[in-house]
């Protein structure tokens, strides 16, 4: 028997000697996952995007440079880290290549990127169907980004999807495109009154990506499992938040994949026994983009102030984010369904200036108090927040380097959120910069 592993068990075959971590959003997305991933990027060997597509976006600030990433894992900005796009991601090849070119032009080395051959492609007909179907729904629309994510995942589940590896076999690619359009053109023409899409045009566009993507494609599941077995540190990065998970989110106002911790396994090909920590990113208040229920949403001056001070505009869409107070019910739910070991609290600095800060500790539904996330969609739609009020602070905290540097009321706010949310807060963001983070305890 060798030395004990970090989890306290004696070393044995199959035991992970160093952490494999999942980092995910604990609300509706836009919590600051990019900043958290970038903070760890210099300490990990691989950063893996395991689900979603270019409907997600991370903003990372390095010095005076701001990077908006959509498909690429945030680890692309760390020169010692290998970024990986796993098989659970849906990839728009034109978006990916544009993003790579943009980083290359800014001096970022993108040659280390690995792309799973099993990842599904977003084709031109997916984006067309996404946009026309959302428009067709009218008031019942879900609030998608119109980037073809849902239709691509639908084709994947219907077993008619096109994968990255299909780009390298023209015969298979032709069969799949023609078969898909036999059905989809019927829908476009007869239901939506749109022009049919020519299979040859789609085929030509997709084949044009083959040589440009070939050098990135790998058996990423094999690479990652071998890396973990060799003692490398692997970080799995979710694209959206827990409440947008297709199974555990506020359905149907969700994404089409699983950003929760279980999705890290299916989307990467790494088994759950190899994951040692699961970190949930929490904003110090709450935001949401798109339609769907949002109990603490504000339609007043406070909501506008949170949006303005927090720069709450979508990285990918540019849409205004809906803003509200912190919701501890959602945080507890995220801790439970993900098995969170830690929280990373972001944007605490945005709350400086309020005399008192409401925190939602429970819901009122039909006259009764509910302390946990209701499983019924109807109940959640009717949930009204039950608030506790915590004293605020006026000081600028953007320069704080430790917990002790924070004003007393800011420290009390952090401790209250930790107690309500069900997992320790191990890091606190006090500004957008890479160095504006207080580490309470190490993630590694």
Image: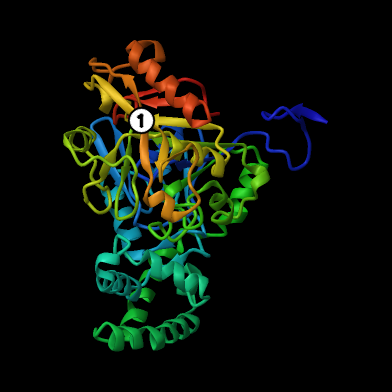
For this rendering, which residue is in front, 139 or 223?
139
Tell me the quarter of the image containing the N terminus: top right
> Which residue lies at the image location 29% right of the left edge and 54% below the top edge?
290
Image position of 6 (left or right of 67): right
Q: How crowded is mark 1: few (under 14 residues within 10 Å), some or many (20 or more)?
A: some
**Residue 197 appears in the figure:** no
Judging by the rendered image, the residue that carries numbered circle 1 is 387
For this rendering, which residue is in front, 168 or 47?
47
> Which residue lies at the image location 32% right of the left edge and 39% below the top edge?
296
For this rendering, which residue is in front, 72 or 299?
299
Q: In this view, does 108 lie above or below 166?
A: above
**Quadrant in the rendering for residue 79:** top left
For this rendering, which residue is in front, 103 or 440?
440
Q: What kind of colouring is applied to the model shown?
A: rainbow
Give the percent coordinates (x, y) of residue 180.
42, 82
Give the percent coordinates (x, y) of residue 287.
31, 42
Q: In this view, does 169 lie above or below 50?
A: below
Among all residues in the image, which is located at the extreme front?
367
**Quadrant in the rendering for residue 273:** top right
Image position of 219 (left or right of 59): right
Image position of 209 (left or right of 266): left
């Amino acid at each position: 028997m060798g030395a004990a592993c970090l989890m306290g068990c004696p070393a044995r075959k199959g035991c992970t000697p160093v952490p494999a971590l999942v980092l995910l959003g604990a609300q509706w997305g836009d919590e600051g996952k990019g900043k958290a991933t970038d903070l760890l990027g210099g300490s990990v060997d691989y950063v893996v995007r395991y689900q979603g597509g270019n409907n997600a976006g991370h903003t990372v600030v390095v010095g005076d440079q701001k990077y908006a990433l959509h498909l690429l894992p945030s680890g692309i900005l760390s020169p010692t880290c290998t970024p990986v796009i796993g098989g659970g991601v849906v990839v728009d090849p034109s978006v990916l290549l544009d993003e790579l070119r943009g980083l290359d032009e800014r001096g970022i080395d993108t040659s280390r990127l690995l792309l799973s051959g099993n990842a599904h492609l977003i084709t031109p007909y997916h984006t067309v169907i996404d946009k026309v179907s959302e428009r067709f729904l009218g008031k019942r629309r879900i609030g998608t980004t119109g980037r073809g994510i849902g239709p691509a995942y639908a084709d994947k589940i219907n077993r008619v999807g096109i994968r990255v590896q299909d780009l390298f076999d023209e015969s298979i690619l032709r069969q799949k495109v023609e078969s898909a359009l036999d059905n989809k053109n019927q829908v476009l023409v007869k239901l939506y009154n749109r022009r049919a899409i020519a299979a040859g045009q789609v085929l030509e566009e997709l084949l044009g990506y083959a040589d440009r993507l070939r050098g990135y494609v790998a058996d990423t599941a094999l690479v990652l499992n071998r890396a973990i077995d060799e003692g490398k540190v692997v970080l799995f990065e979710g694209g959206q938040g827990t409440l947008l998970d297709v199974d555990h989110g506020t359905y149907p106002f969700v994404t089409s994949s699983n950003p929760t911790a279980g999705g890290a396994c299916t989307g990467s090909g790494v088994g759950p026994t190899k994951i040692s920590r699961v970190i949930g990113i929490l904003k110090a208040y709450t935001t949401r983009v798109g339609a769907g229920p949002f109990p603490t949403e504000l339609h007043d001056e406070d909501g506008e102030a949170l949006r303005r001070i927090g720069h709450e505009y979508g990285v990918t869409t540019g849409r205004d984010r809906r803003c509200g107070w912190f919701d501890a019910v959602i945080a507890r739910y995220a801790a439970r369904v993900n098995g969170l070991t830690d929280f990373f609290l972001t944007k605490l600095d945005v709350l400086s200036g309020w005399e008192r800060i409401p925190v939602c500790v429970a819901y009122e539904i039909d006259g009764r108090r509910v302390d946990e996330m209701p499983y019924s969609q109807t109940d959640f739609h009717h949930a009204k927040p039950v608030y506790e009020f915590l004293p605020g602070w006026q000081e600028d905290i953007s320069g704080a380097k430790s917990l002790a540097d924070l004003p007393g009321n800011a420290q009390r706010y952090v401790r209250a959120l930790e107690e309500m949310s069900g997992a320790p807060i191990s890091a606190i963001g006090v500004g957008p910069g890479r160095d504006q983070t207080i580490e309470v305890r190490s993630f590694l």
